[in-house]
Amino acid sequence: MAHTKSLGTSKNLRDSESKRLGIKKQDGQTVSVGQIIVRQRGSKYLTGKNVKQGSDDTIYAMQDGKVKFRSSKKIRFDGKVRYIKIVEVITA
């Protein structure tokens, strides 16, 4: 005969591994071809000159140079103004 009551099992103690998103290279840092600048979900940062966007929205360098972040206005289809952040690589 058991001396203590039986306890239930927990089924929700697992957690997913973090995805390590965010900015990997800051403004003014040098990058080479293929280096990741920003890892993101969705298009928080948009691509500018000498960068491309991967299928998982990762922004990476297409040429050697320095990273440049800038802000700009973009007019949406309904006429509202949206401020966007653009990532570029400036070649020397």
Image (cartoon, rainbow, N blue to C red):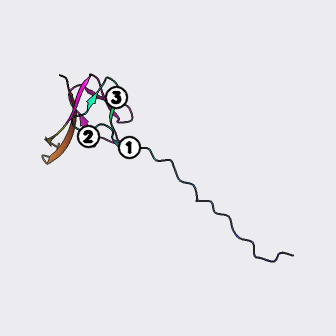
Q: Residues within 10 Å of mark 1 (few under 14, many from 20)?
A: few
- The percent position of residue 19, horizontal first and vertical second, equals 44, 44
Question: Reading the chain from its start, which is encountered first: label 1 or label 3?
Answer: 1
Residue numbers of the magenta segment: 39-68
Residue linked to disc 2? 45
The residue drawn where x is 16% and y is 46% is 83
Q: Which residue is mark 3?
A: 35
Residue 69: percent from the left, percent from the top?
Answer: 20, 38
Sequence-first tag of 2 and 3:
3
Q: Could you say which disc has been placed on residue 63 in the image?
A: none
Residue 85 percent across, percent down from the top left: 20, 41
Q: Position of residue 52 (x, y in %)?
A: 29, 28
Depicted 37 relative to depicted 10: above or below: above
Q: Callout 2: 10 Å neighbours few (<14), some, many (20+)?
A: many
Q: Earlier in the sequence, mark 1 or mark 2?
A: 1
Horizontally, residue 82 falls left or right of residue 56, namely left
Most extreme residue toward the bottom, as rendered?
A: 3
User: Dot 3: within a 10 Å radius of its alpha carbon, few (fewer than 14), some, or many (20 or more) residues?
Assistant: some
Q: Quadrant of the N terminus?
A: bottom right
Answer left or right for 70 relative to 24: left
Q: Residue at x 38, y 43 (%)?
A: 21
Q: Residue furthest right?
A: 1
Disc 1 and disc 3: Cα gap in Å?
15 Å
